Amino acid sequence: MSFLDLTLTWTDHPLTAPDVAANVVDLMLTLGDRHRGTFSILLCDPDDHYRATISVDLPQDHPWPPHPAPPDRPIRRTRPGAALDPSAALDPSAALDPSTALDPSAAPDPGSLCANALHPLVPAIQTAPDTGVILALGRPGPARSPALDNQWAQAATTICQAADLRLLGFYIATRDGIYQPLTDQPLAGRAAVGEPAVDRPRVGRPSAA
């Protein structure tokens, strides 16, 4: 499954099927969006037809989970500046100092990030009665990070319920594809079926009606 599976008339059909919605998310969030960290709100009309996408860039210094290294490339950690000293590669004491690692507690939690991205947009969305929304987190890192992804999905669900917004689905988009946390729907995307992922220019996307 990928954006390539969408028909030319996909905007004429409701995005109620998770596999179709995942393909639309794959279309709307480029690899650049996923690499940077982006929260996207896909707006749908009362009949659940796609109408527009609003994207919000997330803090660049947010400590996203690292993408796992390929099996044949072991992870090598060195302290800052160690690469300048050839002897450091042979020195076990050159291992990464834990004190230099990112402190997750110093970064905003998923609930706060989701709220900061959604709350400014809620009043505008509420002006169009019965608007449906599909929410998607584009992030770097592994295809699945259950603890993080589930927190985002739960926060989005809670916020939409409190604001009386019709949430049609919440999706995670990484370079490896698209999936739904909590419901654990299968991945979608070219990389998920063994094909190389490619970035796409922001052209040809339907504009708001």
Image (cartoon, rainbow, N blue to C red):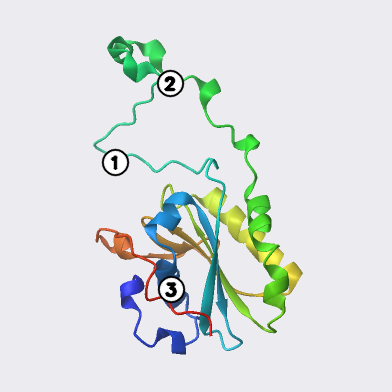
Confirm whether residue 142 shows in the render. yes
The residue that mark 1 highlights is 70
Query: Where residue 80 is drawn, which disc sits there?
Result: 2
- Graded by Cα atoms within 10 Å as few (under 14), some (14 to 19) or many (20 or more), the crowding at tag 1 reads few
Distance Cα–Cα, label 2 vs label 3:
41 Å
Q: Amino acid at mark 2?
A: Pro
Against 201, residue 71 (above or below) is above
The residue under the point 64% across, 36% down is 105
Quick one: quadrant of the N terminus? bottom left
Q: Quadrant of residue 93?
A: top left
Q: Nearer the viewer, mark 1 or mark 2?
A: 2
Q: Is 65 or 202 nearer to us in this picture?
A: 202
Confirm whether residue 174 shows in the render. no
N-term mark: 1 or 3: 3
Q: Position of residue 77 (x, y in %)?
A: 38, 25
The residue that mark 3 highlights is 24
Q: Nearer the viewer, mark 2 or mark 3?
A: 2
N-term mark: 2 or 3: 3
- At mark 3, the secondary structure is helix
Distance Cα–Cα, label 1 vs label 3:
29 Å
Q: Is 182 or 79 nearer to us in this picture?
A: 79
The residue under the point 52% across, 51% down is 146
- At mark 2, the secondary structure is loop
Q: Position of residue 106 (x, y in %)?
A: 64, 35
Q: Position of residue 19 (x, y in %)?
A: 42, 74
Q: Amino acid at mark 1?
A: Pro
- At mark 1, the secondary structure is loop
